[in-house]
Image: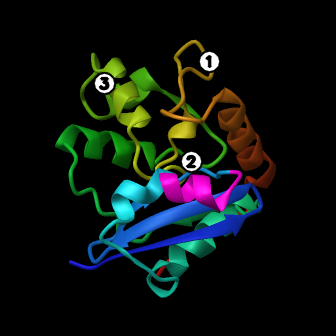
Amino acid sequence: MSNYYDIFLTEMGWVGAVKSDAGIRRTTFPFFSYDKCWQHLFKWITNATRSQGPLSEIREFLQGYFGGESLYFVNPLDYLDTSLFNRDVWDECRKIPIGETRSYSSLAFSIMRPKAARAVGQAMANNPLPIVIPCHRVISKSGSLGGFCKGEYNLKLKQKLLDLEKRTLGLAKPIIG
């Protein structure tokens, strides 16, 4: 199986993506530097070739998204190395419309696991495809932003992404490869 990666500049910072023959495997939130983005992706790109061609659709999607275009990414995803539960959660999360939010418990209910809100939160925290799987659209049932991914990402970024989507609502178009 071939793996490819690319790191590119968007209006919000440096973003990276990894793709296998099966589909997109990893994306990142924006980083302030190329080096930080590369370090974040390092463990997934050790056996990958840097190439823009195979990643042109995800590059177009992410640059458009961070530039304020409201786009849907519909190309195949590669969920290798994850549980069926996480796949179910992530697929359900992808159904949340741009500019809207859902609670962790709402997602749990949607996948027929009404008592699994905490596990849904863990799936969101381990999301390998930020923006493509819009974990930033998942909030606590009280309406607060709740937790937000592992690492350098914080609630300010979550709010910034939700605000970006609200400003661009209604301009949605699919990116189909």
Pointer 1: what residue? Answer: 143
Residue 119: mark: 3
Q: Is residue 7 above or below residue 144?
A: below
- Residue beneath the point at 65% across and 35% down: 158
Q: Earlier in the sequence, mark 1 or mark 3?
A: 3
Magenta segment's dominant SS is helix
Q: Is residue 28 above or below residue 93?
A: below
Amino acid carrying mark 2 in the image: Pro
Indicate the position of residue 114 as horizontal and vertical percent values: 29, 20
Dot 1 crowding, Cα within 10 Å, few <14, some 14–19, many 20+? few
- Secondary structure found at label 3: helix
Amino acid carrying mark 3 in the image: Ala
Q: Is residue 148 left or right of residue 79?
A: right
- Residue beneath the point at 76% across and 47% down: 164
Query: What are the residue bounds of the magenta stretch?
Result: 32-39
Indicate the position of residue 56 as horizontal and vertical percent values: 53, 81
- Secondary structure found at label 2: loop
Dot 2 crowding, Cα within 10 Å, few <14, some 14–19, many 20+? some
Pointer 2: what residue? Answer: 97
